[in-house]
Amino acid sequence: MRYSRLSDSQLDEIVQHLVGENDEIGANAVRARLAAVGVRVQRMRVRDSMVRVNPTGAAQRALAQKLHRRIYRVAGPNSLWHIDGNHKLIRWRIVIHGGICGFSRLVVFLWASDNNRSSTVFEQFVHSTSKYGVPSRVRCGHGGENNDVCLFMNTYRGWERGSAIRGKSVHNQRIERLWGDLWRGVTHVYHQQFSFLESERIINCSNELQMWALHYVYLPQINRDIEVFVDQWNNHGLRTVGHQTPYQLFVQGYLQRQAQPLTAMAEVFETNTAPQGAVASVPVLNRQEVVSVPVNQFSPSQIQMQQFQEVDILGGPMNGEAIDALQTPRRDASVMLPAADQLYGDADFIFQQDLAPAHSAKATSTWFKDHGIPVLNWPANSPDLNPIENLWGIVKRKMRYARPNNAEELKATIRATWPLITPEQCHRLIDSMPRRIAAVIQAKGAPTKY
């Protein structure tokens, strides 16, 4: 194997990009992610890099409780798939459905959605069979979301052979084990993000508009990160099988067992007697869905859709544009209008804002026009021409003296600092606008004393 020729600093930069602020992801997972993007590095170099990039996270993982492993045996690849749903984000009406091959530990499907319907699980299952073939058996829980998959398996493989094995989650250990890695690799990042949004009262789980917006903004991000996780998982070496990857075990298992009379082998090597196209011929199910996730009742208007469509929703899990998009409809309606009425009453005023995508969107412009609020048509790029920048400077100086030690202290400091800014300070900043404009013109756009 030829390893990539990277300096320690280059490797650290790539590792920092892959890990981000995730303290839970380990060296083997990072090495697999590197391999998935074509970077092959020795295991020890990856471990050393992770210590340099995030020593605190490395220490926490070293002290974490180790797993107790049990013996697991199945005949070969596609002999048994384990499928299940992960409800770590159920508070925000998001469910992740997944399936894994018991023999090779290849993740065959993994997807987040805003419902727990059996049709959703079946759609992902059918899509995965087009890539990896139909398994001989599946193991799943008793939940109604698995009904369609179980009906298909019993119809396609037979009713009296255990084609769909339903039982407790303790017997579904392959997928249960995967959920732990998914939590460390993806889910906990969004759990923390959504909890933060709730604590800041940016979202409310009982508000249909905000839940719809949360799904519109974050579901594509979650599924993007899940795809990265699946690539990492299917390319990571398994210690108990000589560091072979799930992909390697899956392909190797088929090649080594092609002559054996196994159901999964017979289908791949065209020695089976099952009718072709059976997946497409499954009868349409008309029974009522068993749903544990409330259906969102909100229907966005054309203006609201325009506003969200102009946001880069794949900018990253902690993307400020996404958070801004969640806040804008609520802030404009319930915060800005009462404040403007209190400050100005019937007097004329002009509204100024920066060039954040949520502010410059067509839908936002339409909202201001519909409410008769004139907006400055040249949002200032220069901090000298936007008085709000001076207020942020006051907040930052006070925070610097406070020296918060963690996120909670930081939030408490911001909340305590903002009310200390007096209306007189704001009015003085607004009154300085003519002088600011003259100074910027004289400096030909260069920085000024403001």
Image: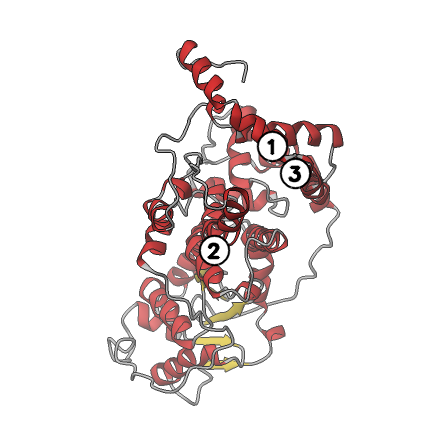
Chain-order first, disc 3 or disc 2? 2
181 sits left or right of 81 in the view: right
Q: Is residue 59 above or below residue 94?
A: above
Which quadrant of the figure has residue 109? bottom left
In percent of width and height, residue 220 lies at 41, 54
Disc 3 marks which residue? Answer: 418
Q: Residue at x 49, y 26 (%)?
A: 6
Q: Is residue 227 above or below residue 37?
A: below
The residue nearer to you, when weighing 261 against 52, is 52
Please say if 164 is above or below 343: below
Residue 394, position in %: x, y? 64, 28
Where in the figure is residue 142, as x and y percent of width and height? 53, 81
For numbered disc 2, what is the local secondary structure?
A: helix
Q: Earlier in the sequence, mark 1 or mark 2?
A: 1
Quarter-wise, where is residue 269 in the image?
A: bottom left
List the single residue furthest toward the top.
442
Name the residue that disc number 1 marks.
49
Res 145 seen here: yes
Query: Which one is closest to the eye, mark 1 or mark 2?
Result: 1
Real-space Cα distance between discs 3 and 2?
53 Å
User: Which residue has dot 2 on it?
Assistant: 246
What amino acid type is highlighted by mark number 1? Answer: Ser
